[in-house]
Image (tube, rainbow, N blue to C red):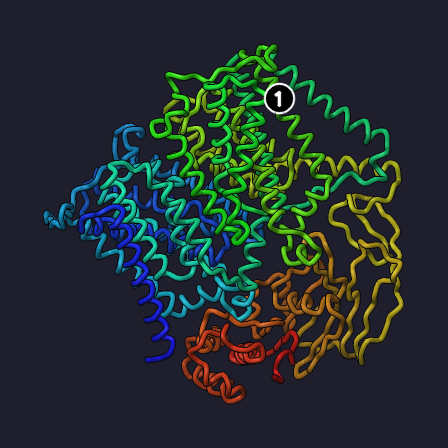
Amino acid sequence: MSQLSSLALVRHGRQAVIWGAALGALQFIWPTPPGVIVQGVVVGSLTALLAFGLSLVYKTNGIINFAQADLGVVPATVGLSLLRDWDWPYFVVLPITIAVAMALGSAVEFLVIRRFWKAPRIILSVATIGLAQMLLGIGFYIPTLFSDEDGLALLRFPRFSPPIDFTFEIDPIVFTVNDLLAMIIVPVTIFGLIAFLNRTGVGTAVRASAQSRDRASLVGIDVRGTQNVVWIIAAVLAAVAMVLRAGMFGLPLGPAFGPAILLRALAVAVMGRMENYSVMFVGATFLGVLETAIIWNEDTAALIDPALFVIVVVVLLFQRRVRGRAEAQAEGSQVETASVKKVPRKLASLPEVFWGGWLAKLALILVLLWLPTALGDTDTNFASAVMIYGVIAVSMVILTGWSGEISLGHMGFTAIGAATAAVVNVHYQWDLTLTLLLAGVVGAVASVIVGLPALRIRGLFLAVTTLAFSVATASFLLDEDRFTFLPDNIGERVTRLPLLGQIDVSSEHAFYYVCLAALLAVIWTVGRLEATRTARVLRAARDNEDNAQAFGVNLTRTKLMAFAISGFYASLAGGLFTLHQQALGQGSFSPAESIRILTMVVIGGLGSVPGAILGAVFLQGTEFFSDDIPADIRPLWLFASSGVGLLVVLMFLRGGLGGLLYEVRRRLLAIVAFRRQIPVPNIFADQRIDDHGETAGLGYSAPVAVSRSPRRDAEGVFCYLPSRQAPPTDYFSFPDILIGDDHDGSLLSVRSIDVSYGPVQVLFSVSIEVAEGDFVALLGTNGAGKSTVLRAVSGLSTADGGSVSFEGADITTMAPHRIAALGIAHMPGGRGVFGSLTVAENIDLGGWLHRRDKQHMERETARVLEVFPGLGEKLNEPAANLSGGQQHMLGVAMALMAKPRILLIDELSLGLAP
């Protein structure tokens, strides 16, 4: 037995011991019959299927897939409609359902997910919210295609009759064939998934792509194709889980696919760190047993959500977190915000800019002051609600946009403020001002407590704790039957007491002005805060924690400060909301609302306060206009406006509505600068440095000092470098590189390429000619662009200008895996291996393009092991266990496996001489 197998047995044995100990503790608290335990295990196994799909998507895309459960909606409703309405046999319907799921997963990835290939991960995460709404809308109408009944009557599929009339009992539960099918199909599905990922070439390619998309594409793997496979698998897992769940309990097309189920799957996925499927399965089955045990003993599900919150926090806090560089980069890229540039000083003092800005703000305020006079009470009430949601959205900007902490449970903080305001209003009749301040303070304290895990965990793992908090708050902390001091929605109304004991705010119009004043006050204070060191520290910690600490930033205080400020504003908005509704209700603070708040901020533009408010107006507006839509098509309207509308906004306005607003401002400033002939280059988009040393944009040119004196760096290599007098906008680069004197008959030809990373151009007109048999060295200081040249040749970076040709064919815009197939192998700098894969699997992936030629694979494997004999002793070890030098050897071995025509090696000698 290999050492790896022994370690696996030890690990599984440890998990079995932990599961047994947890089950024993549960039995001590809530004694549960064997049949209920078995039922819990089956229910938990369905959650495990969803968790597996979540983890696969997270590893390949780096996102939270909010549509994971909803991927099962369309195939499940098709299959269940065939069962219920057309009486098709179960064993005919199941493969049809899986086929529909495969087609759906492939279509979703190709039509939606692929459109966000280079978008920040949080943008893609929110896009899956729109996808979830869209899939729910489709699932809602599918049953009407199979039945003449009204769509509203088909919102729930009852538990369908089992295909075979057979039952068995495990005291006290009577199980049917539907339960038995779940007990059989789930393990088969899990073992099939594990076998596919570990025993097939495509599965290995999926695992490699999940670890590093760039590196996988360089060995010839079609990364987008493997991503498509992942979404197919995720859809199949969701469909199987939903169909089996329908056989056991029925399937409601609404709450069943909401945040509660998402939370369970997310909690299970993070227990296994998104990669350990055995831990996920054990965690899922335990949560299933916990859920059934609580319902059996307490005869209510009220304690499930708070128990789940406690478990999630404890597991994450005591889970040993070992973050590798890749994981740290993935977490850091979850939140990417475009900095909102201030008006340049040269323009800010101009009369048309200074007075134009103030007049625009004054006009907006006057419109808002006038608005209630033109609206009735109902519309004024709605306008007040939009402003309250605007305050909540601004609070999210501080936490997510500035601090980078993803919160999926922000409405929980709003609920805390609402409950506080309701209690002091009903029982103590406090003044409105004091009520709102107390609500904000209590919410800030609660936010800091919930934010304590942020001291150790972040990104997705912290997001799960906030979602668990929101779910527990909505279902447990706001339960008026359990907490009798909370005002009852019918017996004890929240009243709008006079402001400062004198000003009547009971009418809708008067309370509108209270909400407007609160919103303007929040905007003003946040604007002042944005100009302080506090905001700069929050952003610094968001972008690079290690560097921030090196400069003396206290991360503990910084993170808790972000939670406190954000929680204060969110809870203040909660106090306003309960006075706005004049009631405290659980439905207004549901976890779905928390996810909706995150959507508002992303639609508006992360980091942008005006954008957040525009996002609130956009989403609230879609709901407002739905009131005028006929009832029979209202669900379709909501589906189209919120789901499809969200996807359209994210696809075409990557900077959000706030980005569109700032783009309009930028263009107006550019016109002013052009007319005044004031050189302000940083307000122009697509800025380039032309051959005459000038920057050009929007028809305007400003002189830039650039030295054109060549300096000889090495034999045959000439570099033009900008002079020290060049402004900061002129980036360090290689304007021209010429290698060799004869350019005819070149195998590889790079002609005048420009390459940019976002708005920053890093290569300027680089040219290289490489003939057959040439050995070429590219020399330069760190950051000069050597690696970028290689990335442009291999397709990892797309040239903005110029061309790259191979044997006379233009490959400038060709995908990296297609370039690799031509015979161009690129070994990136650093450790270019797949750490979670074994050495043998890495070597096999190096020969991916020749994988069907067994003789080639055997011959080349023997050759590289002869060149690097140390690798042969570690074939079954994960590549991450190798030393740095050994990993570099493995990277070279992978490149040699491809038998390339051209071999590009970044940092060739790195670590090769231990």
Image height check: is 281 above or below 163? below
| In the foreground, 717 or 655 | 655
Q: Name the residue tied to disc 1.
A: 516
Q: Does residue 599 appear in this view?
A: no
Question: Which residue is at 77% across, 26% downward?
Answer: 358
Under circle 1, the secondary element is helix
Residue 462 picture location, percent across and down: 50, 49
Say left or right for 575 vs 667: left
Image height check: is 26 above or below 190? above
User: Type of residue at label 1?
Assistant: Leu
| In the foreground, 592 or 639 | 592
Residue 569 picture location, percent across and down: 58, 32
Local crowd at mark 1 within 10 Å, few (<14), some, or many (≥20)?
many
Question: Which residue is at 86% across, 33% downward?
Answer: 350
Q: Quadrant of the C terminus?
A: bottom right
Residue 649 picture location, percent across and down: 56, 39
Question: Which residue is at 58% across, 25% downward?
Answer: 387
| In the foreground, 287 or 694 | 287
